[in-house]
Image: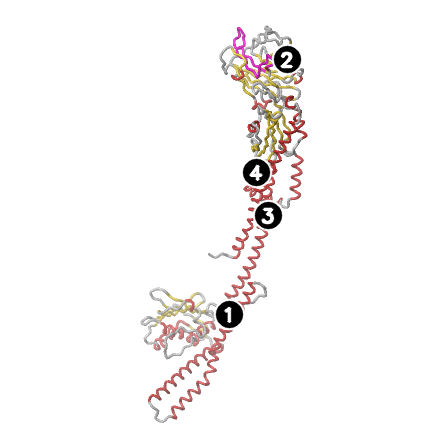
């Protein structure tokens, strides 16, 4: 598999991925450290709050943290919207989900076995402004209203209210109506035996609305009437004749001052104290032993001012804002999403139910994590016991979101990815430019080397040595030097024949003359001496023939200039040459000539072309297998004549197919009387190139294997 230089450098550039991987690892470590630091800070704040409250003498007694009774005490919620007394529950949303169901566990009295279908109710008490609001969703299978002429409001379905005012005085009230609609309270005698109302109480106002399952009552009571204790009870009268109370269910017994429940509203004293310990973007909550929130201060949300400052800082200091926008889809794959502008629930829960509260009430400090409902926000909470003189009276909960930590982690990941992308772009383009530059130089050097040597193995051009002082420059200069040396050696080899002819002809002529004179001077030489002289003269004659062939080859280029080209039919000429020249010269060889159907006109020297073909025929005859023909085929291809001469026999080594047409190259291994120095095919190539043609040899495989020489000549020059 071939791998280009560009691909290798591209693979090397992948090492830049170390940048985001390092950023991911560092951001994870930073998140762990920041979370641990945040936990320590929250725990420290929680301990500070606990210590501050414990150092305030009597605050837990005043705020009623002792002697709590979950079944009797009332925890009014802070209503998020104004309440209209219309018998509808839409004003009570979303706090309505916190309403408490009263049934069998809260039966104060009953004349028959309790039946939940006969009486049960959901109750919610809340505070807004200067009033306390109460909602009763009563399930009653049979409604009995007050008789218009009756002085006893207890002889109908009604609601009992027990209040201890701010001065500690017990008051009893009753709410009954003759029909659905607006209703006011009756002030009753604290003595339960006195059933007749003392007076109307217009400050207690309400609305009574019938429903398919019973009725709804909304009440409004001024906070000025209420002290620290309060109780409600719903009375059910089913018999319209005797009008006796069948079942009484309540939050506590409203008829006796000692049995009223505590009204445990959020403590303003504790909240003022928490305000002095304000921690930005944190929420502090004080929870009593009933898991009820008794005080809270702070918010989990980032203030609008901080958000604006963060946005301005991000826009003014970040140089990657545009890239950040473009890479947002990629960032989302690696970052952890969270809600930065989440909406805090309007309803503030009065009961806190998160992991760690039970452990805190048992005396164990802990750190817990939870997510807000319907928001991608993780909250970290530090919970420690709240002690008063060694007694656990509640827990302190300090909460804060992990948004800032996640934002910092995400920012590091985003900047790591952004820097990596920028590095990839810059380094990638740099490497690509560098690789392209190197590739161009190497390709240029390769093309020079490829074009320097022709298909037949001759050196036709030179390699231009560059002056660059690098490895490629060194390679270029080395190749140029090597090619020049090869060219000089080739020129020396090609000129060697001419030099040999000049240097050897003179001494050879002297040897020939000496041998002839010796033959004349000897009188009656022995037969053996005559044979020696004969062999020596024969060898001298061979040497002279060889030198003549060398002279013809070396002078061919000059001789070709003085040829006499003419236009003639090459097809007809070859036919005559075969019939009258080659067949008589090689009587033991069969020639098969395939002439073209139309005249094959060519403009050239007939004698030179005949000389070229004769040498190919002589070469084919020398290497052909016995009893196999020499095939000659001439064809026309557009403006080109193609001559093919094929002989069956041994093939040529592939590496020599381009070399056999060079000077002084011979594949003959046998000895014969004909001199040869590998100049015949060199003469053939010279004649072909003089006629602006090309020549090549190729091996033919198969049953009739051999060598085919293909000569292409322009039909007209």
How many callouts does the rendering have?
4
Q: Are marks 3 and 4 in contact (CB under 8 Å)?
A: no
CA gap between label 2 and label 3 equals 74 Å
Image quarter for residue 305? top right
Check residue 370 for magenta coloring.
no
First in sequence: mark 3 vs mark 4: 4
Check residue 240 for magenta coloring.
yes
CA gap between label 3 and label 4 equals 21 Å
SS for callout 3: helix
* Residue ID for mark 4: 337
Q: Which mark is residue 170?
A: 2
* Residue ID for mark 3: 419
Please tell me whether mark 1 or mark 2 is closer to you in this view.
2
* Residue ID for mark 1: 460
Q: Position of residue 39 (x, y in %)?
A: 60, 35
> Between residues 416 and 279, which one lies in front from this camera angle?
279
């Amino acid at each position: 598999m071939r791998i280009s230089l560009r691909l290798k450098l591209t693979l090397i550039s992948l090492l830049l991925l170390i940048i985001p991987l390092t950023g991911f690892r560092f951001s994870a470590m930073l998140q762990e450290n920041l979370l641990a630091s945040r936990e320590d800070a929250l725990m420290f704040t929680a301990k500070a709050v606990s210590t501050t409250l414990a150092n305030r003498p009597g605050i837990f007694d005043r705020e009623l943290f002792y002697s709590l009774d979950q079944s009797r005490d009332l925890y009014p919620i802070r209503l998020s919207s104004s309440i209209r007394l219309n018998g509808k529950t839409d004003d009570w949303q979303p706090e309505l989900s916190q309403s408490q169901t009263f049934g069998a566990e809260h039966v104060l009295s009953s004349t028959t076995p309790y039946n939940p279908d006969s009486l049960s109710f959901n109750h919610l008490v809340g505070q807004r402004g200067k009033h306390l609001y109460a909602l009763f969703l009563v399930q009653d299978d049979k409604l009995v209203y007050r008789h218009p002429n009756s002085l006893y409001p207890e002889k109908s379905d009604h609601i009992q209210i027990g209040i201890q005012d701010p001065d500690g005085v017990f008051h009893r009230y009753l709410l009954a109506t003759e029909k659905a609609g607006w209703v006011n309270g009756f002030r009753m005698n604290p003595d339960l035996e006195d059933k007749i109302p003392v007076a109307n109480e217009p400050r207690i106002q309400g609305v009574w609305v019938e429903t398919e399952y019973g009725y709804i009552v909304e009440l409004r009571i001024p906070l000025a009437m209420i002290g620290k204790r309060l109780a409600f009870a719903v009375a059910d009268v089913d018999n319209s004749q005797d009008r006796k109370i069948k079942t009484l269910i309540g939050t506590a017994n409203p008829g006796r001052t000692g049995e009223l429940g505590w009204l445990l509203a959020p403590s303003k004293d504790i909240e003022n104290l928490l305000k002095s310990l304000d921690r930005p973007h944190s929420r502090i909550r004080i929870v009593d032993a009933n898991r009820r929130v008794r005080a809270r201060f702070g918010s989990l949300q980032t203030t609008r001012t901080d958000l604006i400052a963060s946005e301005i800082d991000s826009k003014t200091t970040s140089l990657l804002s545009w890239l950040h926008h473009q890479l947002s889809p990629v960032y989302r794959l690696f970052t952890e999403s969270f809600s930065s502008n989440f909406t805090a629930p309007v309803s503030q829960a009065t009961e806190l139910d998160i992991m760690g509260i039970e452990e805190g009430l048992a005396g164990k400090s802990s750190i817990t994590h939870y997510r807000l409902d319907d928001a991608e926000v993780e909250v970290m909470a530090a919970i420690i016991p709240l002690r008063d003189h060694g007694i656990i009276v509640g827990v302190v909960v300090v909460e804060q979101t992990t948004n800032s930590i996640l934002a910092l982690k995400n920012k590091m990941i985003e900047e790591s990815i952004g820097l990596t992308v920028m590095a990839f772009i810059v380094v990638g383009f740099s490497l690509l430019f560098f690789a392209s530059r190197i590739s161009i130089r190497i390709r240029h050097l390769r093309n020079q080397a490829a074009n320097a040597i022709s298909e037949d193995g001759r050196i036709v051009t030179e390699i231009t040595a560059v002056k660059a002082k690098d490895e490629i420059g060194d390679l270029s200069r080395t190749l140029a030097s090597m090619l020049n040396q090869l060219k000089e050696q080739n020129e020396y080899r090609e000129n060697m024949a001419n030099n040999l002819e000049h240097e050897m002809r003179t001494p050879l002529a002297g040897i020939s003359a000496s041998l002839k004179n010796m033959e004349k001077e000897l009188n009656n030489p022995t037969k053996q001496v005559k044979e020696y002289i004969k062999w020596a003269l024969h060898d001298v004659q061979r040497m002279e023939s060889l030198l003549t062939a060398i002279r013809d080859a070396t002078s061919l280029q000059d001789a070709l200039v003085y040829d006499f080209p003419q236009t003639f039919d090459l097809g007809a000429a070859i036919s005559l040459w075969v019939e009258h020249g080659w067949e008589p010269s090689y009587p033991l060889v069969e020639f098969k000539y395939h002439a073209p159907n139309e005249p094959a006109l060519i403009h050239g020297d007939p004698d030179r072309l005949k000389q070229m073909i004769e040498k190919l025929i002589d070469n084919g005859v020398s290497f052909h297998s016995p009893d196999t023909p020499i095939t000659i085929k001439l064809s026309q291809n557009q403006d080109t004549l193609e001559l093919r001469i094929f002989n069956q026999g041994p093939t040529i080594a592939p590496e020599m197919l381009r070399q056999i047409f060079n000077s002084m190259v011979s594949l003959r291994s046998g000895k014969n009387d004909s001199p040869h120095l590998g100049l015949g095919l060199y003469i053939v190539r010279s004649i072909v190139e003089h006629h602006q043609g090309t020549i090549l040899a190729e091996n033919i495989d198969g049953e009739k294997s051999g060598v085919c020489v293909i000569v292409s000549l322009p039909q007209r020059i």
